[in-house]
Amino acid sequence: MEKQFLIATISSIVFYAIYYFFLRKESFHQFNRFYLLFAMLLSMVIPFIRIPVIGASQTGSNIMEVVTYIQLPEFTVYAQNSSHWNIANLFLGIYLAGVLFFTLLFIIKIIKISLLIIKSKGKRVGKYIFVEYDENIAPFSFFNYIFINSEAYNQEDREQIVLHEQIHVRQRHSWDLVFMEIVGILLWFNPILLMYKRSLQVIHEYMADHRVLQQGIETGAYLNLLLRQLTLPNEWMLGHHFNYLLTKNRFKMLKNHHYSRWALAKIGFVAPFIALLLMLNCNNKPQETKEIELQINLENMVSDSDEEITYDVDVTIEDNGNQKISVKEAEPPLRYVEEMPEPIGGFNAYYQFLRDKLIYPAEAREKGISGQVMIEFVVEKDGEISNVKVLAGVDPLLDQEALRVVRLSPKWKPGKQMGKLVRCFYQMPIRFTID
């Protein structure tokens, strides 16, 4: 999980850097708005995207490829320490505490707005609900609510303010801010989130300003109104404020309505960076999520020199009363068959069996011994598990525990080749981990 958080943070920083250096000063505000929203959403999704990389050996070959063994997903056994407060749990506790803190802040903001609605006069006009209050704070909007101290403005100023806030409502800008609040709760440790939120609010103001001027409002009068709002406090940071972030850049944007060819070309810089981030997170093992690795060979029935060979013994009684004993080598187990064996009840049930039976040896835990034990076994025609052995061990303490439990395995559903029951190899890695 730490890796996913790190990738999400790096991705969000890269995307914001693209916006800051290439797009921030341009006037295609609608594109910039959706770019920032998409960039944040993609940053959260990228850590979980896996792109299979097809190697040369996997491309249209006429060589018959046969799997030499099937390896089950790795099963991990954790040592239970006497203290639950290890480093991993400490970081998890800090993260959850941050999530709780910022969730409470978000709830407090919602409550404050709700209380203002309850104690103030509200009037519905079409889809807008106007809330008039007595507090000396700047006008703002939140979803379809428009908050304004009507007694503080003359009719002309009020009309301009209301028009500005109606544009925020129509363009659903509040949804952007709520989305960023939720992201801020989940990724509160990300230092770039505040810049995303502020940039979105500035873009919202640019969009509303331009629409106001398109309605025929005189630019000088509108700028004077903005300047008069500078002394009013902005307490409702979840909403849109009429005087939010009044800077010289906002004044410049009021006059800038044209796109240069160079400005439009900057949009083309975005795609290569997205592709690069996806490539850095791509997966060169198509089945990595299942942790199953298939090794390729030209033969199906391969017998290692150290494998145990079993025999079928046939005892018959001849007419003269003598016993005739014939011994023949049993058919060797196959590495891969058309219908592979599987535990009765499914793999989830088998892994539950392993969870119930495997015990981290106390001596190994005390000595700090850990690692992966690779076990191989054969699923017989009757579903019994046989020929259990360690292919790659760590320590006798861990090796013997893995052997003990796998030998206790319940029956499996046997494998089939061309409709006939066959013996089949399986391999399973068991990892012993100390928290």
Image (cartoon, rainbow, N blue to C red):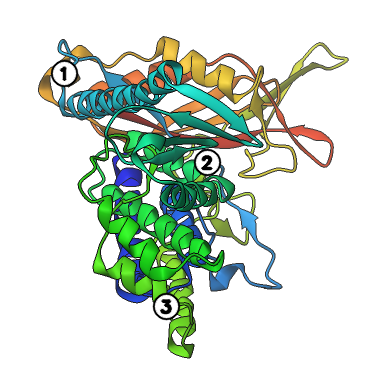
Image location (x, y in percent) of residue 293: 51, 48
Quarter that holds the C terminus:
top left
**Residue 85 numbered tag:** 1
Residue name at image x 39 percent, y 54 percent: 200
Residue type, label 3: Asn
The picture places residue 283, in percent across and down from the top left corner, at 47, 57
Residue reaching furthest right? 319
Check if mark 1's residue and mark 2's residue have beta carbons within 8 Å: no
Q: Position of residue 410 (x, y in %)?
A: 58, 14
Camera-nearest residue between 250 and 388: 250
- For residue 36, above or below residue 116: below
Secondary structure category for the residue under label 3: loop
Identify which residue is drawn at 32% across, 44% down: 5
Q: Element at badge 1?
A: loop
Of the numbered discs 1 and 3, the one sitting upstream in the chain is 1
Q: Residue placed farthest to the left in the image?
A: 367
Going by the numbered disc 2, the residue's amino acid type is Lys
Q: Amino acid at mark 1?
A: Trp
Instruction: Report the residue marked by disc 3.
Output: 256
Marks 3 and 2 in Cβ contact (< 8 Å): no
On screen, residue 109 versus residue 345, left or right, reads left
Which disc, if any, is residue 194?
none
Among the 4 quarters of the image, the one containing residue 434 = top left
Residue, disc 2: 290
The alpha-carbon separation of the residues under discs 1 and 2 comes to 30 Å
Tell how many labels: 3
Residue at coordinates 51% horizontally, 28% vertically from top-left? 387
Q: What percent of the width, then of the height, locates residue 360?
A: 28, 16
- Of badges 3 and 2, nearer the viewer stands 3
